[in-house]
Amino acid sequence: MPTSYDQIAYPCSPQAQTHPGLLATLATLHGLTPTPIDRCQVLEIGCNDGSNLIPMAADEPGSHFTGIDLAQTAIATAQDWSRRLGLQNTTFTQADILDWNPGDLRFDYILVHGVYSWVPPHVREAILKLCRNRLTPNGVAYISYNALPGCYFRSYVWDVLRLKTKGLIDPLEKIAAAREIAAKMCDWMGNEYLQPAIRKEFELLNKVHESVLLHDDLSECHTPFYLSDFVEAAQIHGLQYLCDAHFSRDSVHNPDLAGEEWLTARLYSDFVSVRKFRSSILCHAEAAVDHTIQSGRVWGLSVSSPAEPQPEQDDGTQTFKLGDEKSLSTNHPVAKRIISELSGIWPGSRKASDLPLESLGPDDGAALLLRLYEARAIELRVQPPRLVSTVSERPVASLLARLQLASGQLAVTNQRHLIVMLTDELSRQFLQLLDGSRDRAAVLRDLIAHFEGKAPLAAWHDNGPASPLELALMLDQGMDGNLAQMARLCLLVA
Ligand SMILES: C[S@@+](CC[C@H](N)C(=O)[O-])C[C@H]1O[C@@H](n2cnc3c(N)ncnc32)[C@H](O)[C@@H]1O
């Protein structure tokens, strides 16, 4: 039977925080020995159109990726992409979590993103049961969910939407009614007491994709949980909470916290940050998790940094831009040196043990790396992403990115499992030519052939369309810069 996800497709995208490479890193930091990601079994429950699993499968031909979802149309799209990429290591199946039977299969990584809060209690139980029964002994499961206390504010909004859309069945009518009432509530609400915070929630509603509005906010189910509720539900099913996908400092700064106290510390931090969403990682109850994060576990990891160093100030403080309008300022000499050095080789990485941290000693050196990791100034990985940071003679962009562009998408998935928007026609054509068969001269020749006399160039040139010679010069001069940019965007592979 068609589901609401068949009627109106969900705008899926790769979720970097679900990547087995990240889950393996966090498990390693917590004292576990996860299965290497180049020879593992991965299951995604509620995989939808495969936007999350397909890029992983394309990068790791030695591993197998299984996706299940109730929506047949989404599964058909996943199967189609798998075929177009020639992947031999995926299985996409239309199935209900409640009665799916994978035979004897066990999985090293189970991913459940955007599902747990949006299904009724018996399906949530089935998800946890599946994780318990189907995870390998050293396996890890990722489950994201709406969190309390932040979702108290969203509950207010959901109640208003329920009131407004009561009796409506047609999804498009529901969306229109929801948008209308959200806009009105923004106008009606003043600045008293909690009104500004709640107005913000209504403003957000008017910004989200209509399909997200329908499936997330207008869904009959969007149950939020305190971390403690989630941990307890997991414990009942023989699973234990390892950490969240976004590494947080509690465990670094409070190495002595254990059991209740350790959980209580996190709950307080959720109250302080008014947290609305969590991406939690579970493992078997029997696994020997060590939340103290011993320094020895850091040294074998690879480290990279996307930070952009700004000029040092007179007092020695240096600011590093981290993207999303975030930044880190520090006057710690070793931190400055490490971030600058790593950002110079981005997107390349170095082994933690090869970084110039000797002056700090092993424990303080590892603690510094963990603090920088928590601040998102560096990335830690058991295995660096499969990308190249230097441009070769015949550069290659990932087949997935090239096919995404060829199918008319403006967004491509990069080798760090993130979306990159390529909004200009030149970048899109340029990337599609990087298939490993062309050197720079051939890329230039085919790029000129593509654009010659075409309309977009008129817009790039103040005095009307560029002549063939002007065009050749412009593209030639931009060649090295464009190739370097593609490498920095993590779109080039070996
Ligand atoms: C909000 S979407 C999330 C999709 C994707 N994981 C993401 O985050 O972009 C929820 C997905 O769970 C699937 N789903 C819901 N209930 C299910 C069930 N009982 N069995 C299998 N899939 C289910 C839906 O079809 C839908 O694709």
Image (cartoon, rainbow, N blue to C red):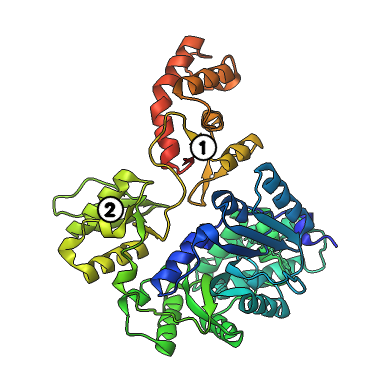
The residue at which mark 2 appears reads as 339
Q: Which amino acid does label 2 sit on?
A: Ile
Above or below, 111 relative to 124: above
Q: Which mark is on residue 212?
A: none
For marks 2 and 1, the one nearer the N-term is 2
Query: What residue is drawn where x is 43% and y is 68%?
Result: 26
Above or below, 389 relative to 173: above
Query: What residue is drawn where x is 54% and y is 72%?
Result: 139
Q: For the N terminus, give its image quadrant.
A: bottom right
Q: Which mark is on residue 397?
A: 1
Q: Nearer the viewer, residue 92 or 180?
A: 92
Horizontally, residue 260 falls left or right of residue 252, namely right
Kindly state the secondary structure of the residue where label 1 is placed: strand
x, y (%) of residue 471?
48, 16
Tell me, yes or no, whether the two marked residues, 2 and 1, touch with CB atoms within 8 Å. no
x, y (%) of residue 342?
30, 50
Kindly state the secondary structure of the residue where label 2 is placed: helix
